[in-house]
Image (tube, helix red, strand yellow):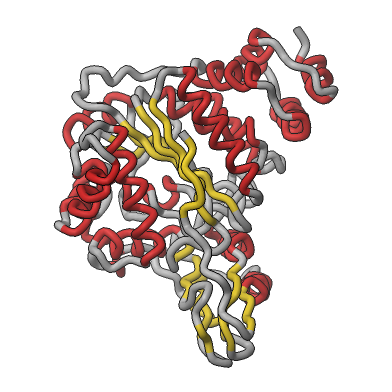
């Protein structure tokens, strides 16, 4: 079997066999297949897609590339949550502690930023001392003790996905539905969960720009989960403007802390509560979804979710005091305001442009080896639908280096659209799949 022959066949739109996909995954994981050949395969897949049989085979091959955890000794229905990526999307850091405080064991294997979108691990690692490189044994022990643990894709868990995840970011293949579905589901199915809640983003700031594509992705992932006998639900949610007000790693941790202390933005709070409620419901803590919503709100309002998050931060080596004293988090050295050129209503905030500008300032990666600057980012002062005056502040840029700053500022200025009429209100949660 030759790798180049498989690339040619995939480029020609042919279906690859289970054995051929296993060969590609095993070869790339072991280093026998180089980056440039796997990049060609990824691009061929991007243009030609995959059949259901190929998608299942790719996902299972990636899952079997490392250790598949068994968490049967941990009581309860194990539930995770995953987002397909957005701008300002820090819901995992809110809904997971809420669900865990309600009694759901949450084994959360998270990713890093891809393109203009942020990553849960990068946000967590902006907390001084926080470690995500735990061993499987440490992961299991913390899950048993606290009911929640955040780790990355270690060499032990879905190592094929860890390599492919980074390669997709720098080869223009991030948006491929089968590659996204297999990436997410391989690591989720390898972590020993019983159920999964998915947040599939759609809109300007998401990888899926059209709702029909978001629905296809949601259906693909729900289908993979069902074939593996897992309970899976997906929410399709709007990402045409950033979620919340903060974009950037330490800035988003600050907003997480505020939200867990009942002082967060309305959109972020609402979506986090709904995701947490579905985790609670799939975790069989409550018999109905409405009761799960009530329990999620109770756990936020009584402070137990915030206490749970601080316990997890401390257990993973972080400084929990940084969640109350933001000066202990990385802070930028410079700030620039972006002002409204005219009076009117904010009719759009192009989330992708905000994400790209934050990435240019150092909050994200252009190449897989780039180092994140945890301090930089953007704080919005307005949201879509709000009235602004000429010269009022639309947002603030926080930076530590002036390289790319002017270009980022220009991009952010263009991201705000001001019109004479208030725009129609857009739904945050668009569909439920599964």
Q: Nearer the viewer, residue 245 or 336?
A: 245
Please state if 174 lies on the left or on the right of 313 as rendered: right
Task: Name the residue: 28% across, 24% down.
Answer: 137
Find residue 216 and report its image quarter.
top right
Which percent across, then down, holds residue 161? 54, 28
Number of numbered discs on residues = 0
Task: Name the residue: 78% across, 11% down.
Answer: 2
Q: Is residue 27 visible?
A: no
Find residue 134 and report its image quarter.
top left
From the image, which quarter does the N terminus lie in?
Answer: top right
Q: Nearer the viewer, residue 110 or 34?
A: 110
Q: Is 95 drawn above or below residue 65 in the view shown?
A: below
Q: Nearer the viewer, residue 421 or 42?
A: 421
Task: Name the residue: 82% across, 25% down.
Answer: 11
Q: Is 86 drawn above or below residue 418 in the view shown?
A: above
Please state if 235 lies on the left or on the right of 48 as rendered: left
Which percent across, then down, holds residue 404? 65, 68
Q: Nearer the viewer, residue 273 or 364?
A: 273
Which percent across, then down, holds residue 33? 69, 20
Please state if 152 lies on the left or on the right of 280 as rendered: right
Q: Is 64 drawn above or below residue 365 in the view shown?
A: above
Please state if 310 lies on the left or on the right of 208 as rendered: left
């Amino acid at each position: 079997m030759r790798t180049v022959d498989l690339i040619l066949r995939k480029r020609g739109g042919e279906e690859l066999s289970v054995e051929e996909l296993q060969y590609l995954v095993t070869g790339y994981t072991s280093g026998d297949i180089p980056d440039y050949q796997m990049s060609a395969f990824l691009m061929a897949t991007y243009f030609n897609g995959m059949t259901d049989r190929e998608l299942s085979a790719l996902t299972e091959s990636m899952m079997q590339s490392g250790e598949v955890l068994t968490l049967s000794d941990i009581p309860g229905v194990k539930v995770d949550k995953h987002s397909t990526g957005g701008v300002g999307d820090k819901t995992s850091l809110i809904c997971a502690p809420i669900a865990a405080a309600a009694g759901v064991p949450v084994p959360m294997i998270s990713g890093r930023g891809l393109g203009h979108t942020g990553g849960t691990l990068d946000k967590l690692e902006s907390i001084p001392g926080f470690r995500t490189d735990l061993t499987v044994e440490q992961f299991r022990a913390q899950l048993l003790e606290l009911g929640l643990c955040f780790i990355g894709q270690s060499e032990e868990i879905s190592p094929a996905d860890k390599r492919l995840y980074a390669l997709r970011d720098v080869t223009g293949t991030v948006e491929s539905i089968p590659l996204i579905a297999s990436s997410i589901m391989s690591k989720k199915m390898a972590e020993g969960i019983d159920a999964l809640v998915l947040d599939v983003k759609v809109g300007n700031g998401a990888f899926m720009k059209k709702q029909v594509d978001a629905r296809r992705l949601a259906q693909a992932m729900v289908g993979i989960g069902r074939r593996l006998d897992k309970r899976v639900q997906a929410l399709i949610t709007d990402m045409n403007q950033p979620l919340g007000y903060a974009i950037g790693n330490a800035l988003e941790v600050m907003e997480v802390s505020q939200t867990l202390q009942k002082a967060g933005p309305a959109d972020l709070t609402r979506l986090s509560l709904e995701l947490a409620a579905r985790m609670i419901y799939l975790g069989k803590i409550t018999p109905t979804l409405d009761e799960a919503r009530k329990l999620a709100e109770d756990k936020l309002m009584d402070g137990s979710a915030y206490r749970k998050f601080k316990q997890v931060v401390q257990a993973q080596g972080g400084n929990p005091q940084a969640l109350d004293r933001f000066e202990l988090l990385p802070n930028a050295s410079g700030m620039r305001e972006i002002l409204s050129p005219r009076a009117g209503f904010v009719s759009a905030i192009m989330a992708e442009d905000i994400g790209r500008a934050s990435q240019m300032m150092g909050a994200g990666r252009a190449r897989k080896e780039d180092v994140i600057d945890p301090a930089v980012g953007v704080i919005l002062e307005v949201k879509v639908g709000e009235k602004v005056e000429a010269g009022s502040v639309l947002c603030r840029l926080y930076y530590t280096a002036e390289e790319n700053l002017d270009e980022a500022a220009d991009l952010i200025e263009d991201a705000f659209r001001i019109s004479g009429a208030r725009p129609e209100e857009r739904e945050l949660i668009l569909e439920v799949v599964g």
